[in-house]
Image (cartoon, coloured by chain):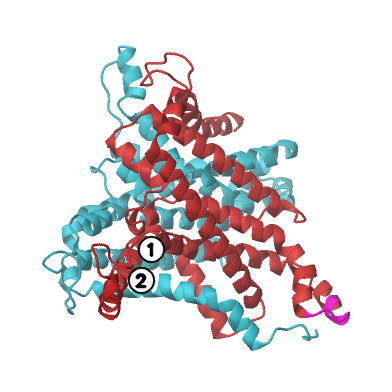
Chain colours: A red, B cyan
Amino acid sequence: MRGYAALIYVFLYAPILLIVVFSFNSGFSASDFKGVSFKWYAKAATNTFVIDAVVNSLIVAASSATLATVFGTMAALALQRVKGWVRTVFDGLIYVAIMVPGIVIGISTLIALVSVFGLLNTALVALIPALAGPEPPLALGFASLIAAHTLFNLALVIVIVRARIAGMDRSLIEASADLYATPWRTFRQVTLPQILPAVLAGFLLGFTFSLDDFVIAFFVAGSKTTLPIFVFSSIRRGVTPEINAIGTVVLAVSLILLFGSQLLLRRGHGRPRRA
Amino acid sequence: MRNATGPSPLLTAVLLAPGALWFLGLLVLPLGVVIVFSFGERAAVGGYQAAFVLDNYLNLPARWTAFKNTLVLAPIGTVVCLIAAYPLAYFLAVKARPETRTALLILVIVPFWTSFLIRTYAWMFILGGRGLPSLIEWAGLGEVRFINTPFAVLLGIVYAYLPLMIFPIYVSLEKLDKRLLEASEDLGASPWRGFMQVTLPLSAPGAVTACMLVFILLMGEYLIPQLLGGGKVFFIGNALVDLFLQSRNWPFGSAVAVSLVVIMLATVSVYMRFAGRIGGARDVSLV
């Protein structure tokens, strides 16, 4: 039993470790271990395409996680008191957003936005002729990417924050109202401090999802390149040690985000809740 | 229970509005468009032309290989994951020392939340020409090829989804009342019989949830077959990318997408009914 467990851990971690080890290999292939160097890191860090992709990924992740955290927390707070069809519809939509495969979300968002943009562009150019030009006024890019990621993150945040609200001490809110606090003050001084760890954890998990997502971004990014899109297209051109270096950095960053979110979820709560 | 702190309907509406708009514009609208497009015709230059025909659905057998690969490899991948995961979940819940248990559990979950693309790429690196095969050749053991085979795809699947399988099984095993096993032992049952008649049935709900989660994600898989199957072992997801980005046949692609979701929903509901009967898994939830 113990031996089997050890074997599974080796299986889970050996590939990751290999990537890390070979990112420091100055040679070009696995059978060609020439010694430790940072040359692939230097190469990746000076590659303008990499820098561009990293910046784009960070912009999209920060924006979509922020939007989803604000809107998701708002929805979770309202949903705790709503009953009837509104709640059923919301529950159903959250379920669909999480269950429908990313690839279907990606293509359907692509064709819906392209169709809607097509109609709007014709209308806009007809109304404001100054907008006519080689570039249509509305096109896929940052906005569509952020909007699409926000959808999944929204479902994620609602689920996490709602779990926290369900475990919250309601008597404090009632006490606050008894002491004549306004609803806003009750929210700021009683509710928010209690749900804050879950809100921040939702933000971090959303950030991680957005940073890591390839399938949805692949369809709705238009001409923009995110880091996963860059990595994917370089992989298709052939495996290079430079990808190992980028991969090691990506793994390190997602580990930091993961531990951050888990620490927050554990605070004050006995055990971590996982979405 | 007093309700003096309840917000007004207006406040509730304001709080729900952004989320509702988002779901409407980026989930309901796109999925509706896909359903409408799936009955349309391909425009001459690609894309969509309004029509109401069933041709796209009748044409589905043209992509039979993708459906077949998905419907064969997704269940096999799920079962292999289950077989690999169960002993570890059992070890963690029953045999592991309490001091090390949390750390071991975190070690299982960590890979699941780290970059999926990079983890799949890791196997591409290992199985690809410059990885394991180059070492085997260097050692003089001949030429082998792992990448772009069903084996590579299956390996990638098990690697990627093992953590997701282990966690729910662990949770159900951990909740198991150890006194039941003691009772079974007191009544003269062998440890094996105790496991088969007590532990296994009681951990069934966790296993049912885990299998469903993994199966759903596998049905929509794109990256693993793309990177480790190299166009030879492709799933429905790969067919969708091809239809939308290469041949730009949106109506047919939409029909494939709708079919994928329908097959997924049908399989899951049949599975839940069946599994609910054997596992008593009534309260299985996705999140």
Does residue B191 appear in this view?
no
Rendering coords of residue A92 (x, y %)? 49, 74
Cβ–Cβ under 8 Å for marks 1 and 2? yes
Q: Which of B174 and A16 is in front in this view?
A: A16
Q: How crowded is mark 1: few (under 14 residues within 10 Å), some or many (20 or more)?
A: many
Which residue type carries mark 2?
Pro
Query: What residue is shown at x 26% (from left), y 44% (from top)?
Result: B233
Tag 1, which chain? A
Q: Taking B254 as reference, is A19 left or right?
A: right
Which residue type carries mark 1?
Ile
Q: Which disc number belongs to residue B30?
A: 2
The extreme right residue here reads A179
Q: Taking A82 as reference, is A189 left or right?
A: right
Magenta span: A176-182
Task: Please say if A108 is above or below A254.
Answer: below
Callout 1: SS: helix
Tag 2, which chain? B
Query: What residue is shown at x 34% (from left), y 50% (from top)?
Result: B222
Rendering coords of residue A39 (x, y %)? 44, 23
Task: Please say if A207 is above or below A16.
Answer: below
Callout 2: SS: helix
Q: Which disc number belongs to residue A105?
A: 1
Does residue A58 appear in this view?
yes
Q: Taking B73 as reference, is B205 left or right?
A: right
Quarter of the image for residue A172 reads: bottom right
Quadrant of image for the C terminus of chain B:
bottom right
The extreme left residue here reads B44
